[in-house]
Amino acid sequence: MLLPLLASSGCLYLDGLNHQPSISIADGITSTNRGGMLTIHPIVNDREDGPKGVTVTYRMTLAGSTTPLDPRCDYDATAFGNDLSVRFFRAGIYEVTAIADDTEHGQAEASVMVTITDAPPVFADMSMIQQTSTPDACGYNPAGEFLTLSLAGSVSDADMTPAGCPTSESLSYTWRVTDWPGGAKPVLTAFDGTSCAPPTADSGKMLVVPKQDAQVCLKTDPLVVGSSGMYRVVLDVFDGKTTASTPPGAVEVHADEPPCITGVSPVAGSYVVDRTQLQLFDVEGAQDDRDHFVDGSIGFVWSVRRDSDATWTQVANWRIPSFQLDPSSFGVGEIVHVRVEAIDRSCTDPATCANVACDPSVAVCMVASCVTYPLKCAKWKTWDLELR
Amino acid sequence: MREVEDMGPRAALAIAVAVALAGCDGNANSNGGGDMGIYPTTDLAAVHCAVITIVATDGMGNATTSVPATLDASVNVVGVSGAHWSVQHDGDPAVALQPDSTGTRVQYTAELPGSWTFAVSFDHGPCPGTSFVNLTNAQAMQVDYRFRVLPPESTSIPLKDFKVTVSGGANKMQDLHLVAGNDTPGTLEVAGAPAPGEVRFISDDHGPDAVAFANATTGLFTAVLGDGTYRPLLIPTATAPAIPRAPHLGMSQDSSALRNAVFDIPGGVAVSGSVVDNTAAAIGGARVVMRTGDLPSGPGTSDGTGAFTLYAEPATYTMSFGATDWPEGSVDGVVVPAGGTSASVAYTIARVPVGGSVTGDSVSGARVTITSHDAIANVADVTIGGGAPVHAGGRVARVLFTHADGSLPPLQLPAGAYDVIVEPPGPSMNGLTAFSLMVTAPGPTTWTLPLAPPVSLAVTVTGPGGAAVKNARLTAIETVGLGAAPNCTTDLNGKCTLTVDKGAPLSLLVEPSGLDKISGTRLSVPAGGGALSVPLGPGIQVTGVVLSPSNTPVAGVRVEALCWSCGSPTPLATALSDANGVYRIYLPDPGLGGLDGGVTD
């Protein structure tokens, strides 16, 4: 029936042939960390409709998996025209397929493989371990004492997981002592904002803290060798897969300096005194790198010796900076020596201290000290009294 | 008094006055207790007399004992009439007072300190009565203190004394301005030759001495003097027995006149003699010295023949002598003339061998101090010049150390009573132990000296009103042997416990925190420990800034408050200037009476 119709009209009219649209995705950034934004920008065209007549839809699959992706926890995509901004929240290799449709339902596809990785924790530029405790009067850190440390700077992880999704990731913070002076057994303890927790049996060279800006306490040990030593400490941050660490923070510690007597009254020397009069001696001032004259943490040992005595007699339980001597119990004309020696926390009894500062026969014992200028001071002073 | 104190100060004062002054007709008891009160009939009035209660209050209504004060006098009776009140100040004429409508109460404002006596009589009522109250003038009561400021030696600023007068009830501001002092160089010579020695400039007003030491080869020295006058005391080092090196006490001079002085002293004259025992045997190593006031002689030590020579300036001295194993003795009025003199000492006292040992722990090297309990009337005969021998009194004063087994070294002592102090070397479970022991002739005597452990002294410190004083520093200074100075700080309940040696009397220094505004104290505590309560009174705060000669605050300077008039070297209170140079010292309030700035200490 059609053929006679065609024959009678003399012409055969047919619709034009619809061409498929074209689509391509130029190479660009095809990898990022979890939560990193990628933009897919396809180049489309259509012979009949031109580029504007082509619409693009997307399909995303996880390579090697047939499980459909969860558009909330696995990715988040937003289209702008034919472009697509997409963030993937799970590590893996994804295939993003762009599907071009023209007005005549002609279709074409282009794919790109996108690699999503776990980003490691990253410290901000210039981040480092800083000491928050105050050095002693010499600007030194005292060996054998607590030091407090914190992170100067910050650390972050670029990975992102939408709230409520199962792959949520958290960072853990671990302080670690990496180096210490020979013979030392340093431990890290928590800092409660005002003081350091005392070490326990569980204390060690590592300490986990809840947040990156938490201060920690490093309990150092007295030096076994030398007058200074170095501790090194790092902060490790772990995101569940990768650990990032600060550069080691170096903390130099110094041995306790001996306390110094800066003044006595009367001036140390040889005196002829009335043996019927009580003799009073005062320390007017003393300095130390860690202890103080004002609060009594610098103490004093007073000793007495007659010329005829072989050794000094330490006055028991007399640690205050003033001393009184009743010469009347000594003989007529005797020569009696009175000595005062400063003591601090590291040596409360000179008789048992490891290092003897001077020979006992020395009237004024000068020792090196960082706390006074010119870096020498009197560990002890002596008065000589002739009782006339 | 505890019950009275518990009733509060106002009631306490009223009752105290009433009890002390109760009644007339010499029958104080008849008006006390339940008899006080109602007089309904003339018959009772005939046998009961008016008891006047006086309450003294200050402008704030608080009980007071000082002027100005409102005196409220009353009698606790009813139904009286025809009241006649008067008040009398010390010996002044009595002043009539108008009572209130009941006739039982009058008020008077007392401006003057002294005794205020109220009298009352009634036309109808109890028989007349009188009472009085004593009022002080707290503001007018003053005490002088010597504030001694001891800058650290490193500052090269000399210590300085300040006279500080505190008045009753009033805090005081007083900056303490140090002065640089005047460098006073000089030279010490003996007979024209440079001499080493001690150069002491003695302040004429109880101020601190200035001391310098003359160089061994040049005799040069530099002392730092303040303003005022000083007496130079020159004590050349006795380098050799044969070289005259007697000390010299110069005249008082203004400090400016002492600058660049050459002190060429003559070296004294010889005093030669011998020391022998009671068998006329020579005693070698005996020491002989003389002193008159601040001026000592040179030293004298006997040789193997008992002979000695010392040098002294011509003067009249007290001569002292002693030797190992012999008592010390002394004689007054020893005249050394310009040409020198001789002095011979012949011991006359017999001795008894004494042995013994210290028992307990730490017996090796224990320090044993032996002193005569009583003075010995005659230990030796001393002959000066060509005079007759005089008896020299004396005593034993020995210090020795025990052997490794605790035994005493060989010892001879005159018969008599002795105080023995044993101090074990530390650390020890035991402490200083005191003994009263006898040596009896002919001996030998053996002493057993068991060491005793320390004891506790529990101290409670309270402030005004009985409140506990926390953070008060207590220092117990033991005053026998070499002593000890244990210390502690009171807790929140005002308590702390000292561990003290059993045999040692104490001088207990109580220093409350400056924040408490109460005064410290120093008190004597007998040996033996136990419990002790220390009530502290309100303190007058003396504060200010310690200033350097360049007028800048000086930190870390020790400030001592000493008695002004007595010259006692024992501080009553101490302070240390803070970082801003500020010091604070709390002293007893003179307005509370009974204070003398430590004169009695």
Image (cartoon, coloured by chain):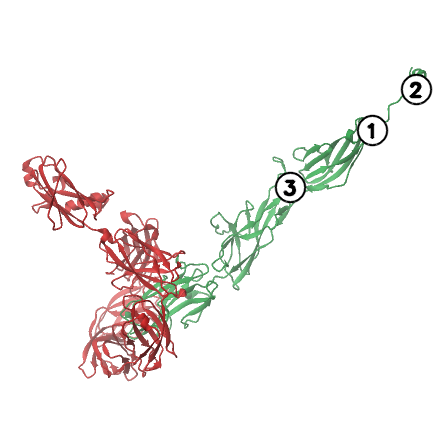
Chain colours: A green, B red
What kind of residue is marked 2? Cys
Which comes before the other along the chain, label 2 or label 3? 2
Q: CA distance from mark 3 to mark 1?
A: 44 Å
Point out the frontmost of discs 2 and 3. Answer: 2
Name the residue nearer the viewer: B45 or B225: B225
Contact? badges 2 and 3 (CB < 8 Å): no
Q: Position of residue A226 (x, y in %)?
A: 53, 64
* Disc 3 crowd, CA 10 A, few/some/many (<14, 14-19, 20+): many
Against A145, is B49 above or below?
above
Q: Kindly state the secondary structure of the residue where label 2 is placed.
A: loop
Against B186, is B104 above or below?
above
Q: Quadrant of the N terminus of chain A?
A: top right
Which comes before the other along the chain, label 1 or label 2? 2
What kind of residue is marked 1? Glu
Which comes before the other along the chain, label 3 or label 1? 1
Res B73 quadrant in image: top left
Name the residue nearer the viewer: A180 or A98: A98
Which residue is disc 1 drawn over?
A48
Which label is found at residue A159?
3
Which label is found at residue A11?
2
What kind of residue is marked 3? Asp
* In the image: residue B61, left or right of residue A382: left
Q: Kindly state the secondary structure of the residue where label 1 is placed.
A: loop
Q: Position of residue B308 (x, y in %)?
A: 28, 82
